Image (spheres, coloured by chain):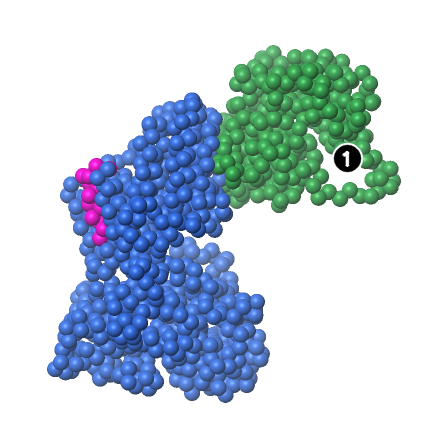
């Protein structure tokens, strides 16, 4: 790495996604991780990444950015730093914590990528963890009374399910039936992806403690419901509103999981002979009304497209986080993409896999990276997600397998 | 007949789960050993625990489809630490003992005989029967953070008789097995570090604790698919085997002189393991365990273990902890060797400023210099970081004036053993100290009450008697004078705990406990020599006890001058029972360090001493000397208990175990005096009821 002197102009560096991995996701309620610590989960993933790439000297890792939405207890104490220590990385490797609610891991990736492009880092680990069983969303939160007094944010905005119902109100064409059908396809696609072995390679098994049952091993996702039917989905109650549209079936559940990835300057990846699974093109975050936070990915994607000079038509593969079916449908409608467009969420999404808040961003990326390898005809892909309190995040990636895309 | 009912057994449950492990076709049955408590109560095997393991194996064998492999692991930080010994005192008949031995073998053999590969994932502390369980598996991984890897059986008076004596030598070779099974337990029950255990071949693979179980399963998958071959060197048989056992026997003889049976039985079993098939070997283990469980030596060993691990942590008669005052600075009067050792200990453990004073600057410099040198040595050995060494060195300073003690909360004196000197020191200190600062004295024989008598605040004076070498011997006799108040005493106990010493409360009686008994004991042996018993005969007389050293080697360690001084003090206090030997006086006057020399490399009677000694004409036999010395001990202990020097005989035993290093198989000393009939003969009664530290009646 060359350090630019003050007199020379800076040269931006290309940033690549070297590899990503995640724990299997669990159900927060009486799930497989009930007695497993969140920090132990993220440590498992970091150790696996280091183990998979012995050519990366651990002391070349310049930072460890780990996200959690609820930074309390085993998700507190500057999680990135404690995870680095617990993972056995050299003491010289620093770390920090990130919070942008659901887009935590995504923000960890963009944050370290910015530092890599800028020349401050060569290699970094970015990821996220959320154990919603040990730390329910908004645990210990103390919302400022001015939110209500000054009409800044309505109470609706604090319950994600309610914001999803609000989206149905805003876009009446997004019916419950469309949402249920989308949810069913998500379950089916996950089952298919598992059957084809597309998911397993990115999973890191985790030893799960149970004082009553003994040690277990988490080696696959717990939330998917392979037998889901449309009829079954239609019968589910709508907990956020009487006769509403949002159900446990067409939304992601409450989950536990951890993800992480290695990001590097492209030249450094070449020097260390690290693989390149995706090349970062650009990213954007945007704010929207908190009461309809689910539309967040649309302006975020707009920003990312604008800054990269691409159009939505350039995107060949989409990995959209499925916090709620309605929120993905709003995005698809906005861009005139069919509900069952094969470019979208090929392996299914969070409705089936689960959505351990701050960890989900990197799951989108590992899945997109695997799809890139299978689709050399595709040049660009998008990972995007909505964020509580009215935000969206979007990251555009280039496929290194694209024709001569390897440069 | 079955084993007695272990009503209080904390049952270790064997929990079975069938895992889907990437890379392993079929299910992997994982047994977790968990007694439902955290790591402070490690898992052990009593009858119900063994039954649970057996039930787990039943379940696994009945499981369909048939499992691909079986693994065993433990709850966090603990694999299993062996048989539940708390039930052993309840065993009254040999056939019950035999049944316990067989019950372990029955279950463990089932694991060995499973027709699928078996793995032990040793995730934490593993001792005795826990380690034997692991040895019955085909393969073993070991966590880098596993604590306490050991076969401590011989330390207590047992043998690793649930397969350990047969499996271990065949796995790691006879010499290593002798080291682990016999030598380490006799060497203050030394435990292995994970790296050492893997180097010895006890485990096949060392894995990081961070993701130990997952990586163990991954390793198992690679062993099962053949991609990771497990190679072990074959144990060398024939002459090497016999030599290893013979070397072990030599070592045990030198240490014990036959005083305790367990290490000898362990060696016999290791010898047998060379050629015996596993069935014959384990049958011999059954017999050995049954024999040993029915020995007084084992019962005393368990009693000693309990004293050291339980009674030592809750000293009888200590006041409520909450009364203790904070100690933020320590003063030490004197800068000689003892004072310097104390300064080092206080600085290391309390991590507060320690000031040494003495009458001349050169002695102070020497004292502080000693501490700094010792800290440098510890740093060089990697036991202290440079920062920590800097911190500790900065804590220890010296001062000519006692004004430096003004803000000390705890001042201990280690000046000349003379009442007037100590009284003068404390009187002077009172002029500088706060009214509540503790005045502690390291006196070994003077009266605390008399030392405190003329002070303005005698309630703050406590006896704080260390044993030499201070860093090694864990005992601290804390002495209460008549004026000592509870807060001062509580503070002394709190300081002792922080110093990691085991404190025993003793009353203000001459020479307290350990020195009183050792002086009496040594006095009788010396008297026998004075009367005409050959030195060698007298010094050999106590060999059958397996003491850490013979009486006259002990004399050399204490130093004849100190021994003479204490003998004088004791003679003044109890003229009818303590004499001052003229031969001892001659030894001191001649400036001899002892009666032996080691100049030639081995222990020999110093010819000059032999010439110096005058002998009477009524020699005793070894038996007579032994009976005389032990009878004297029984008499002295009886008187001490009558006078309330300590709360109970158990405290005497605790003092002898921790302050004199007397062995577990004697139970300190009173169980031995009971079982040899000496207490009965001398006092007309036993110290403890049968069954407490001996076989039940």
Magenta stretch containing residue B511, yes or no?
Answer: no
Q: Main secondary structure of the magenta part?
A: helix
**Where residue B583 sits: x, y (%)?**
21, 82
**Where residue B463 sits: x, y (%)?**
45, 76
In-front residue for pair A314/A153: A153
Query: Which chain shows up in green?
Result: A
Using the image, name the chain to which the residue with label 1 belongs: A
Decide if residue A166 is in sight here.
yes
Q: Residue at x 58, y 27 (%)?
A: A222
Q: Residue furthest front?
A: B1
Q: Residue at x 29, y 52 (%)?
A: B93
In-front residue for pair B492/A284: B492
Magenta stretch containing residue B277, yes or no?
Answer: yes
Decide if residue A398 is in sight here.
no
Is B64 placed above or below B329 here? Answer: above
Q: Is residue B470 left or right of residue B615?
A: right
Q: Is residue B222 left or right of residue B391?
A: left
Q: Which residues are magenta?
A: B264-278
Is B668 placed above or below A52 here? Answer: below
Q: Which residue is labeled 1 in the image?
A: A158
Chain B's colour is: blue
Location of the C terminus of chain A (image quadrant): top right
Q: Quadrant of residue B660?
A: bottom left
**Where residue A99 sits: x, y (%)?**
68, 37
In-front residue for pair B556/A256: A256
Is A207 placed above or below B547 here? Answer: above
Q: Residue furthest right?
A: A150
Characterize the local packing of mark 1: few (<14), some (14-19) or many (20 or more) Cα atoms within 10 angstroms: some
Q: Residue at x 23, y 51 (%)?
A: B265
Q: Residue at x 50, y 57 (%)?
A: B387
**Where residue B689 sits: x, y (%)?**
34, 65
Q: Residue furthest left?
A: B617
């Amino acid at each position: 790495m060359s350090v630019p002197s003050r007199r020379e102009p800076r040269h931006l560096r290309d940033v690549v996604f070297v590899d990503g991995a995640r724990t299997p996701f669990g159900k927060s309620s009486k799930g497989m991780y009930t007695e497993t610590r969140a920090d132990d989960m993220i440590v498992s993933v970091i150790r696996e990444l280091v183990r998979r790439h012995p050519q990366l000297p651990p002391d070349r890792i310049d930072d460890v950015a780990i996200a959690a939405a609820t930074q309390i207890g085993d998700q507190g104490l500057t999680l990135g730093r404690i995870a680095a220590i617990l993972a056995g990385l050299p003491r010289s490797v620093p770390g920090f914590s990130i919070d942008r609610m659901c887009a935590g891991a995504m923000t960890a990736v963009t944050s370290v990528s910015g530092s890599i492009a800028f020349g401050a880092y060569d290699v970094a680990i970015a990821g996220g963890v959320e154990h919603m069983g040990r730390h329910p969303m908004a645990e210990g939160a103390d919302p400022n009374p001015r939110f209500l007094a000054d009409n800044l944010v309505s109470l609706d905005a604090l319950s994600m399910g309610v914001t999803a119902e609000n989206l149905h109100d805003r876009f009446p064409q997004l019916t419950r039936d469309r949402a249920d059908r989308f949810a069913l396809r998500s379950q089916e696609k996950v089952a298919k992806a598992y059957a084809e072995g597309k998911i397993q390679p990115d999973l890191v098994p985790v030893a799960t403690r149970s004082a009553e049952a003994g040690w277990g091993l988490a080696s696959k996702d717990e939330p998917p419901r392979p037998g889901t039917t449309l009829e079954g989905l239609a019968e589910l109650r709508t907990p956020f509103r009487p006769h509403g549209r949002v159900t446990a079936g067409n939304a992601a559940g409450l989950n536990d999981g951890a993800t992480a990835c290695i990001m590097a300057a492209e030249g450094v990846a070449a020097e260390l002979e690290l693989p390149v699974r995706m090349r970062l093109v650009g990213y954007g975050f945007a704010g929207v009304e908190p009461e309809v936070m689910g539309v967040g990915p649309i302006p975020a994607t707009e920003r990312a497209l604008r800054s990269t000079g691409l159009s939505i038509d350039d995107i060949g593969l989409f990995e959209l986080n499925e916090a709620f079916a309605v929120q993905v449908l709003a995005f698809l409608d906005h861009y005139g993409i069919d509900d069952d467009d094969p470019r979208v969420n090929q392996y299914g999404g969070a409705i089936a896999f689960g959505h351990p808040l701050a960890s989900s961003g990197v799951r989108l990326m590992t899945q997109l990276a695997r799809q890139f390898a299978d689709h050399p005809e595709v040049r660009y892909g998008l990972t995007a997600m909505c964020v509580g309190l009215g935000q969206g995040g979007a990251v555009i990636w280039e496929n290194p397998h694209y024709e001569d895309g390897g440069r | 007949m079955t084993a007695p009912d272990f009503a209080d057994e904390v049952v270790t449950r064997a929990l079975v789960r069938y895992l889907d492990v990437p890379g392993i076709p079929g299910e992997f049955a994982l047994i977790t050993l968990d007694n439902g408590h955290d790591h402070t109560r490690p898992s052990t095997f009593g009858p119900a625990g063994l039954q649970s393991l057996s039930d787990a194996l039943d379940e696994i064998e009945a499981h369909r489809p048939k499992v691909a492999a079986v693994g065993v692991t433990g709850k966090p930080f603990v694999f299993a630490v062996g048989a539940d010994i708390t039930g052993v005192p309840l065993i009254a008949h040999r056939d019950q003992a035999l049944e316990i031995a067989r019950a372990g073998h029955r279950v463990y053999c089932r694991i060995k005989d499973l027709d699928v590969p078996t793995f032990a994932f040793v995730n934490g502390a593993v001792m005795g029967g826990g380690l034997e369980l692991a040895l019955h598996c085909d393969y073993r991984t070991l966590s880098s953070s596993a604590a306490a890897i050991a076969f401590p059986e011989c330390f207590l008076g047992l043998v690793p008789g649930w397969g350990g004596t047969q499996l271990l030598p065949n796995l790691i070779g006879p010499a290593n097995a002798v080291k682990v099974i016999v030598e380490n337990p006799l060497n203050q029950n030394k435990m292995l570090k994970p790296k050492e255990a893997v180097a010895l071949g006890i485990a096949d693979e060392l894995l990081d604790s961070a993701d130990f179980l997952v990586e163990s399963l991954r390793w198992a998958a690679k062993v099962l698919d053949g991609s990771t071959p497990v190679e072990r060197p074959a144990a060398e048989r024939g002459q090497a085997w016999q030599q290893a056992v013979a070397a072990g026997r030599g070592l045990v003889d030198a240490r014990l002189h036959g005083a305790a049976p367990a290490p000898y039985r362990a060696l016999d079993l290791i010898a047998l393991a060379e050629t015996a098939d596993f069935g014959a070997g384990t049958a011999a283990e059954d017999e050995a365990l049954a024999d040993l469980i029915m020995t007084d030596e084992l019962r005393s060993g368990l009693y000693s273990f309990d004293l050291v691990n339980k009674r030592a942590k809750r000293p009888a008669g200590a006041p409520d902890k909450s009364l203790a005052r904070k100690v933020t600075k320590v003063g030490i009067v004197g800068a000689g060797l003892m004072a310097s050792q104390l300064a080092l200990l206080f600085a290391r453990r309390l991590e507060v400023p320690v000031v040494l004073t003495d009458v001349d600057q050169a002695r102070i410099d020497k004292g502080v210099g000693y501490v700094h040198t010792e800290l440098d040595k510890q740093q060089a050995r990697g036991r202290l970081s440079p920062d920590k060494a800097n911190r500790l060195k900065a804590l220890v300073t010296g001062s000519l004036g006692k004004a430096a003690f003004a803000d000390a909360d705890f001042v201990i004196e280690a000046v000349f053993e003379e009442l007037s000197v100590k009284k003068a020191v404390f009187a002077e200190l009172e002029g500088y100290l706060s009214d509540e600062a503790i005045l502690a004295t390291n006196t070994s024989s003077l009266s605390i009450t008399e030392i405190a008598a003329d002070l303005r605040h005698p309630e703050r004076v406590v006896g704080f008697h260390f044993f030499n070498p201070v860093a090694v011997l864990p005992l601290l006799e804390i002495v209460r004078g008549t004026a000592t108040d509870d807060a001062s005493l509580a503070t002394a106990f709190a300081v002792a705990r922080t110093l990691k010493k085991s404190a025993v409360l003793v009353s203000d009686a001459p020479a307290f406990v350990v020195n009183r008994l050792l002086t009496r004991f040594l006095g009788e042996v010396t008297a026998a020599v004075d009367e005409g018993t050959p030195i060698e005969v007298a010094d050999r007389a106590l060999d059958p006890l397996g003491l850490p050293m013979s009486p006259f080697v002990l004399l050399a360690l204490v130093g004849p001058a100190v021994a003479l001084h204490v003998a004088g003090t004791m003679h003044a206090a109890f003229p009818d029972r303590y004499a001052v030997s003229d031969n001892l006086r001659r030894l001191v006057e001649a400036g001899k360090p002892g009666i032996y020399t080691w100049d030639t490399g081995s222990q020999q009677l110093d010819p000059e001493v032999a010439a110096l000694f005058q002998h009477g004409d009524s020699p005793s036999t070894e038996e007579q000397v032994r009976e005389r010395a032990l009878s004297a001990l029984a008499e002295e202990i009886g008187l001490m208990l009558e006078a309330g020097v300590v709360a109970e005989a158990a405290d005497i035993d605790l003092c002898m175990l921790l302050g004199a290093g007397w062995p577990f198989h004697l139970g300190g000393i009173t169980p031995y005096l009971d079982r040899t009939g000496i207490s009965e003969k001398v006092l007309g009664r036993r110290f403890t009821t049968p069954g407490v530290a001996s076989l039940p009646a």
